[in-house]
Image: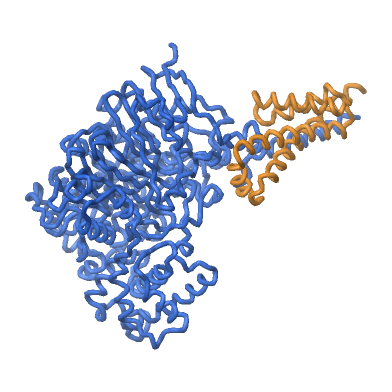
Amino acid sequence: MKFFAALIITILLAFISGLFLPWWGIAIAAMLAAIVVRQKAGFAFLSGFFALLLLWSGLSYWIDSENESILSVRIAELLGIGDNSFLLILITGVVGGLVAGFAAMTGSYLRTKQRS
Amino acid sequence: MRIIPFIISAVVTLILIIALGRKWGSIPPMGKFLSPQHGFWQNAEPVNRDYSGDLQIPGLKGSVNVYFDERLVPHVFAENDEDLYFVQGYLHAKFRLFQMDLQTRAAEGRASEIAGPRAVNYDREQRRLGMKFAAENALAEIEKDSLSNAVLTSYSNGVNAYIRSLRDSELPVEYKLLDFRPEEWSKLRTALLMKMMAKMLSSGVEDDLTATNAHKIFSEQELQMIYPQVNDSLAPIIPKGTVFASPGIVPIKPASADSFYFGRKESANVAEISRPDKSNGSNNWVVAGSRTLSGYPILANDPHLELSFPSIWYEMQLSTPSTNAYGVTLPGTPFIIIGFNDSIAWGVTNAGRDVKDFYSIRFRDESKQEYWLNEKWEPSRIRIEEIKVRGSATVYDTVAYTVFGPVMFDQSYTGSGTGHANLAVRWVAHDPSNEPMTFYRLNRAGNYNEYAEAIRTFDCPGQNFVFASKSGDIAIWQQGKFPARWEGQGLYVMPGEDTSYSWQGFIPQTENPHSINPERGFLQSANQRAVDADYPYFIPGGYISPRGIAIDRFLSGMSSVTPDDMKKLQLNYFNVTAQAALPLLLKYVDPEKLTQDATKYLNIVKSWNLGADPASKGQTIYQCWFDSLEAAIWMDDIQQSGSAATFPDEQTTLELLLKDSTSLKFIDNINTIEIETLNDLVTSTLNKVSNLLLEKEREGKLEWARFKNPRIYHLLKEAVMPFGRQGLNVGGSGNIINAMKESHGPSWRMIVHLGPQTEALGVFPGGQSGNPGSPYYDNFVDSWATGNYFNLWMMKKSDATDKKVKWTLKFAPAAA
């Protein structure tokens, strides 16, 4: 239950941060969510990671289908992964996920530190 | 002890954010780049994007309505000139910002700010050529005229209104890839864009440096043979037999010319690193009512330039109650550049006249502060160019300015050469002028006199302005500011110690080559020499003859001409050079001495129909064979002159062979003991190229289009190949009317039929949007490649509800 709550809160905060802050606002969002929903480090990392995997892959997937993959094919080729839009969407999610995962983990240690 | 995991975790997070937030080599900041709310995903527009809207912008006087048709061509309706050009600026920025920004920074010599140290030499060259100097001089002149000043200011304000509205996430994708930001626009940048065109078309048509090197080893007569002034087969722009006025200025050859100029055998082992393509040229023609089916004139134009994404051209209609014009524009400058209005149509091809000369300078010492001129030391004007370099220290370059111009090459800069020479460059583009006014007036011209008046002040780059009016006039003027030269002046580097070698004046404008309503009922220009030898001025230049020959021949034989005939002519693949060259090759080849493969290819080319169609094998075989023959004839001789000299062009080589077939001395290879004959060369070269041809045939690339792989690069070239297009099914070559080379060719094709209801057709290989994420990025390419044209819609204000209008963007002044 906590995991699910952390996930949702991270997704919401990350999306909102994207409207006002530069791209790294997702780290702040993930860290905040980890402070609000206290989890052990490992779970914090995973909820941060999957939150951004879902958010970033989800957003890019939606954008890509509206765009009929015109740009994603070109960018994928440019980045050397062939014309694989799906892979690009996945990589997008993973990159966001990694940043949010570690940020959330950092947040979880912060909370635990204060406790002891 | 949670503090340690916390610190480790925090450090990892920070390292990730920093690493993903910066550029690594050519890899963009991946965190920012991939973020769906910030990065490239934001440029992946929905294919059904709605371009309609209501904008309130400070700076507008009245309201402006922009109607987009389904090709995303904006039809702009304003109430006054300033608003019109304000919105033109806004639209140029909205759809082509990166292009405008990059091109003008490159023109100014500021590419290093984006590309880093590897662009420093390029930037130094632009500064030393005086690109910024030229733009500053042009701007000062433009600002003296209140109308030009007001228009350019409005245009600039419009561009900036768009730039200021941009959020980071809305930046064009190229900025995100290269990790930099757009710079605000200014009138200087418009002037720089005009100088970019000037460089493209009038810096590089002269061969002064290579000719100077060739001068070392060839005699004057030999040079005349290799680089002739007037080709035998020339079909000049101005019909033969036209009577020319007596010259208003007769330049005097300096007394010392025979020894210090013609007699000088010093080489100049310097070379420009960014020379424009010599093929930068075009075709245009007009057919009078006497030859058309309708009885009304038809005008056609197809400018040939390096193709790119986005296209150098942007299509639009510009309308106010007092002006209405349609055509293609250059993002970075206001006005319609090639197009038509309700009364006339016009087009341009490059004149190719030599308006750039080099002078050899003797400095007193390394400081370059004084140079020897007319028997004394003259102070130079020192200009220190500051070149900012991304990721590195600023480079300072000291350039000396002399009475001739900037000393482009000196001890500290030799371009791509290895020698040493102090050379000042005298270039017409440096002189103050106001080219924008020409287009302002042309857009509004209603008849021949207004057209002639409009182009009168157009100085650089010299262009062949073709014209037709609804009232039935046709005309052509080779217009520019051209130096009046004594015979031979400017072919080679001149002594810069003596002002008697300066340009003594310019050819009076009224004496520029021109023709109005000729008997024969048509006019054409295709970068050939404007006039035959009867013209009373010495006019060197880089001319191309074959297309003019072909166009002249076809038009002469046409009657009851329709726009459809003009389409076919623009798309014509007939190889007029091959028509004369192939029989020559077949005559001198020795079939006994050919290999089996060579024999096979000989048989194919024997039955070739002389068309450079995309599927033609004969064209591939012919071209490889003749190119190889040219190299075999010239390489050994030209190589003696050291730094890269250009081969004489195909047409010249052909004419020399036709005249002189077996006795041309250059046929012999000076590096071998035997004396080669033409038979030897023609045969051995076919054998030689057959190896290449066989290889290509095996790859399925013997057909002409597959052999040359016609392609269009994005402005960032090989760095972003996925943003380009390759493998286009197009034939042709630089010497053929349908002048597609590999990535250089017809950048716009336009045909205007000036009947009571104007009928206009056009197409360019690109799209209106510069965004690689837009369906409008390259949606015209296939039509262009197939030879299809779009109907150009000259919209009326009352057409606002026409179903051809897909989106409406309304501009209104912002409340104060």
Left or right, B620 with respect to B489, comes to right
Left or right, A72 with respect to B640, comes to right
The picture quadrant where one finds residue B64 is top left
State the residue lying farthest toward the top.
B816
Q: Quadrant of the C terminus of chain B?
A: top left
State the residue lying farthest toward the right.
A116
State the residue lying farthest toward the bottom.
B592
Q: Drawn colour of chain B?
A: blue
The one nearer the camera, B271 or A3, is A3
Q: Is residue A19 above or below residue B736?
A: above
Q: List x then y, in percent, for residue B360.
A: 27, 54
Q: List x then y, in percent, for residue B406.
A: 31, 45
The picture quadrant where one finds residue A52 is top right
Q: Is residue B631 visible?
A: no
Q: List x then y, in percent, for residue B234.
A: 21, 61
Q: Is residue B93 above or below residue B779?
A: above
Q: Drawn colour of chain A?
A: orange
Q: Residue at x 36, y 17 (%)?
A: B61
Report the number of numbered marks: 0
The one nearer the camera, B337 or A102, is B337
Color style of the picture: by chain
Q: Is residue B297 above or below residue A23?
A: below
State the residue lying farthest toward the left.
B246
Q: Quadrant of the N terminus of chain B?
A: top right
Q: Residue at x 66, y 50 (%)?
A: A81
